[in-house]
Image (cartoon, rainbow, N blue to C red):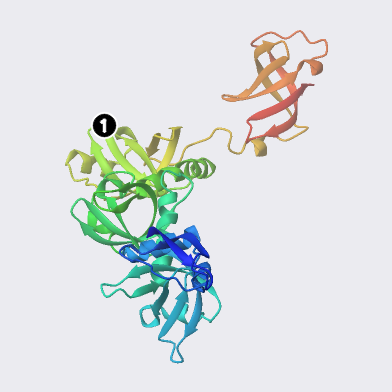
Amino acid sequence: MTEQEITIQLSDDPFDTKTVKVQVPHGTKLMCNEHYAADVLGMYNLTDPILQKTQLTEDRISYTTRGEITFISADRTRALIDTQSKHTAFCSLLKEPDYIVEQLQVGIEIDVKIKTSNTGDVIASISDAIMEVKLQEIKDAIGNKEVGFTGLVKELIHGGYWVDVAGIKCFMPGSLGGLNKLHDFNSLVGKEIVVMPITFSNEKDTIVVSHREYLRTMIPTRIFELEENIKEVRTGFVTGSTKFGVFAQFDDCLTGLIPRVELDEATQRALDNKAINPGDEITFWAKEIISEKKIILSQLGPKIDIWDGVDEKYKPMMITKGTVTKITSYGAFVELEKGISGLIHKSKLKAANLTKGDVIDIKIGSVNVSDRKITMNIV
């Protein structure tokens, strides 16, 4: 649009004139001296947003806006949409999904994407606008570690995968398809996975997503669950092996090492014969959780906890013997058996003069296996 200044004659008096400025399409020249021209131009007084939409249309630039349905054909194959622009947009309902067409009514407002055809027709697309909103939603989530999207891995291509996320075609590098290096890249094709958008590639004009980032967010939860159920046998798959042992991935996102001394005989022989390959299924127990990135596994059985069954063996009011192992300012520690100790609070010691190594009779007060605490009194 361009601004043009014209002089309007307001009455029959040739000297009764007014100079006004109006916005007109490029290449257009307004010429008028009729007295009604001022009223007509007043009706044509477009606001800035309307001028912007009109300019985008005339420059054949696509944009998304909100519009009101003003007409739907009897056979529901076409509709007209008022977008508060100089132009009314035509929408072919044959190109829209049935579930959208079924909900359309004259008078409702919807989001549409406006395009200008080669012949100058203004075309509106409802489904394209929906995709635009979804695309922006995914873009806005880039870098947000709390937002993930379910995607369908459609195709394995050079360097990675095409992943369909709510109809948006996204790219996932092969290295980001799993927590560890994938032993079979084809294994993801056709599967639904949760991905996180990590960047936008200007070169490919697409959003880059990562399944690995999502798996990393799951690690703290899986570690907690592992601690709570550490005696359960687990099944995972081999991610690699060295002469020192076998690495295995399990519980979706955890990776641990089975040291050679913790392998069963059959697995040790397979390791020596180099017959263990990435992707092989393997069973084991968790032996020790040192950190989220360092978990020790074992095929020789579940972790033995010396506190298991202590609350059944030592019950409140039970009288037994124990050995004093330590004297502190707040009481005395007494060992009932190797690794199992309790505390006699200083207020319960009375006048007893205890020293390290004394064997004494005690009465059990309370037993808390989860906190590994036993309270006791001198008999």
- Which residue is most to the bottom? 74
Residue visible at 66% across and 39% down in the picture: 312
In front here: 222 or 259? 222
Q: Quadrant of the N terminus?
A: bottom left
Q: Is residue 357 left or right of residue 84?
A: right
| Amino acid at dot 1 | Phe
Is 87 above or below relative to 21? below
The number of numbered discs placed on residues in the rendered structure image is: 1
Q: Which residue is mark 1?
A: 244
State which quadrant residue 85 falls in. Answer: bottom left
Dot 1 falls on a residue whose secondary structure is loop
Tell me where residue 237 appears, x and y as whole percent. 31, 49
Tell me where residue 4 appears, x and y as whole percent. 39, 59
In front here: 159 or 96? 96
Is 73 above or below relative to 366? below
Q: Is residue 51 left or right of residue 337?
A: left
Tell me where residue 259 appears, x and y as whole percent. 32, 34
Tell me where residue 143 appears, x and y as whole percent. 42, 43
- Whether residue 186 appears in this view of the structure is yes
Q: Residues within 10 Å of mark 1 (few under 14, many from 20)?
A: few
